[in-house]
Image (spheres, rainbow, N blue to C red):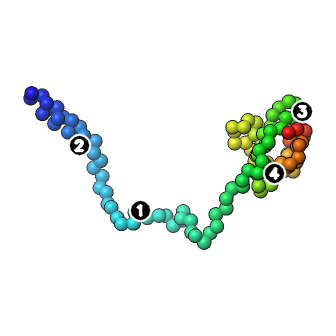
Amino acid sequence: MTRTPMLFALVAAAALAGCNKEDHTIVAGGPQEDPSTAVTNNEPVALPPSIQASKSYRCKDNKLVYIDWMSDGTARVKKTREEAGTSVTVGNELKGDAKASTVTYNGESCKA
């Protein structure tokens, strides 16, 4: 019987020991924002380009290449469907577009 009140006192002491003893000041309006990081309503926010088409291509060396064609004219070339890939501008490294059945990637012809 005498152990129960002593056990409750021990549990209460342990609970109070875990309390945070820092001072907290509660202010109306919340914390102040840093004006250098705040976005104003006057500045438009540029959105990233959207994916227009995602296609897989088989190259002559029997490798698969996955290409996400973006709305801004660039493309993302990937080795697997899951990876993020590398951004490529259509021109030297990649020739073709989303509507073509064949593209050239790193000088190698690939078919859809």
- In this picture, residue 62 sits left or right of residue 9: right
Q: Is residue 12 above or below residue 99?
A: above
The CA distance from mark 3 to mark 2 is 71 Å
**Circle 3 is placed at which residue position?**
60
Q: Quadrant of the N terminus?
A: top left
Image quarter of residue 47: bottom right
- In this picture, residue 84 sits left or right of residue 111: left
Q: Is residue 91 above or below residue 10?
A: below
Residue in view at x 72 percent, y 53 percent: 50
The residue lying toward the viewer, choosing from 36 and 88, is 88
- Residue 18 location, x and y as percent? 28, 42
**Circle 4 is placed at which residue position?**
89
Crowdedness of circle 3 by 10 Å Cα count: few (<14), some, many (20+)?
A: few
Mark 4 / mark 2, whichever is N-terminal:
2
Q: Nearer the viewer, mark 1 or mark 3?
A: 3
**Cβ atoms at labels 1 and 3 below 8 Å apart:** no
What kind of residue is marked 1?
A: Pro
**Cβ atoms at labels 1 and 2 below 8 Å apart:** no
- Residue 37 location, x and y as percent? 54, 62
What kind of residue is marked 2?
A: Leu
Crowdedness of circle 2 by 10 Å Cα count: few (<14), some, many (20+)?
A: few
**Circle 1 is placed at which residue position?**
31
**Circle 2 is placed at which residue position?**
16
Assign a secondary structure to mark 3.
Answer: loop
